[in-house]
Image: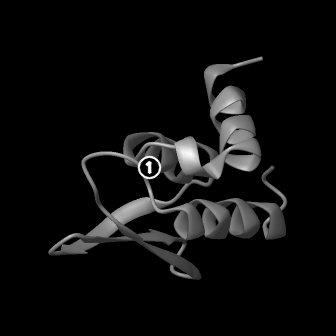
Amino acid sequence: MTQLEKLVRKARTAPQNVRFSELVKIVSRVGGYELYGRVGSHCSYRKKEQYSLTLTATSGLAKVEEVKKVIRRLGEEGLI
């Protein structure tokens, strides 16, 4: 099992324990999203100008609802 697979599994089973930096790895490496804008603490990620995600940057843990949103979106896209 690769490190990214472990991160995705962690996000699915324990979203309350996912760090923001780990969520960014999932979004960019698994999902193929790229950072295209940042205003204050809000980071916007875009993929092929079709899909966009906005995440709130923190120095610690990511917000649980944002982790769930990312997992749901990647599942809808058939990436996980």
Residue 26 seen in this snapshot: no
In the image, residue 16 above or below residue 42? above
Q: Secondary structure at mark 1?
A: helix
> Which residue is painted at 74% across and 67% down in the image?
72
In the image, residue 61 above or below residue 22? below
Q: Position of residue 29 (x, y in %)?
A: 55, 42
In the image, residue 5 above or below residue 17? above
> Which residue is painted at 62% across and 22% down in the image?
3
> Which residue is painted at 54% across and 67% down in the image?
66
Task: Tell whether 14 sits left or right of 21.
Answer: right
Question: Disc 1 marks which amino acid?
Answer: Val
Q: Position of residue 19 (x, y in %)?
A: 44, 43
- Count of residue discs: 1
Most extreme residue toward the top, as rendered?
1
Q: Which residue is mark 1?
A: 24
Task: Tell whether 55 sits left or right of 73.
Answer: left
Instruction: Give the quarter of the image for residue 31.
Output: bottom right
Judge the density around disc 1: few (<14), some (14-19), many (≥20) Cα neighbours within 10 Å.
many
Nearer-the-camera pick, 1 or 16: 16
Most extreme residue toward the bottom, as rendered?
50
Residue 4 seen in this snapshot: yes
Location of the N terminus (image quadrant): top right
Q: Position of residue 59 (x, y in %)?
A: 24, 48
